[in-house]
Image (spheres, rainbow, N blue to C red):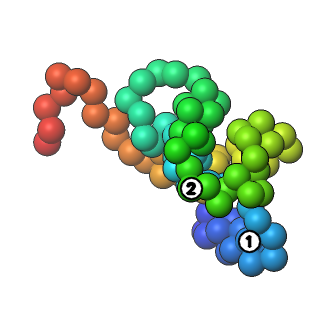
Amino acid sequence: MQTLAVLIELREEGMQTVLPFPLRTAAAFAGLLSWGNRVPIDRAREKYKEEDANWCYFFPGFDDLVATGRFEALAGDVLGPIAARLERWQPGQEVG
């Protein structure tokens, strides 16, 4: 229930201001889009280059996105529970 409460609060906040949460970038940060072992912030920095151009209006560069530390917190709050429950497939592992 705590996760649901966080999502409801974020929805309310997001209706009033832009949240620093481009989804593809956040998913890369949370490790949902990559099999590699790169540092999360490096994965996110790379993915931000592919985000919709509209994000650049609010956050011209990746450093602007992460300047307050809010991006990392949001990625953890929203995508962390999903990432924690995924069973990671590894090369050579049989699919059951």
Residue 40 picture location, percent across and down: 59, 30
- The quadrant the N terminus occupies is bottom right
Say which of 20 and 11 sits in front. 20
Residue at the image position 58 percent from the left and 40 percent from the top: 49
Query: Which residue is depicted at the point 13% across and 32% down?
Result: 94
Q: Amino acid at mark 2?
A: Asp
Left or right: 67, with 40 as reference point: right
Q: Is residue 14 visible?
A: yes
Per the image, the residue denoted by label 1 is: 14
Query: Nearest the camera: 91 or 53?
Result: 53
Pick whichever, 79 or 29, lies toward us.
29
- The residue at which mark 2 appears reads as 52
Label 2, secondary structure: give it. Answer: loop
Q: Nearer the viewer, mark 2 or mark 1?
A: 2
Residue 32's image quarter?
top left
Residue at (65, 60) in percent of width and height:
54
Q: 10 Å neighbourhood of mark 2: few (<14), some, or many (≥20)?
A: few
Q: Residues within 10 Å of mark 1 (few under 14, many from 20)?
A: few
Furthest residue toward right: 68
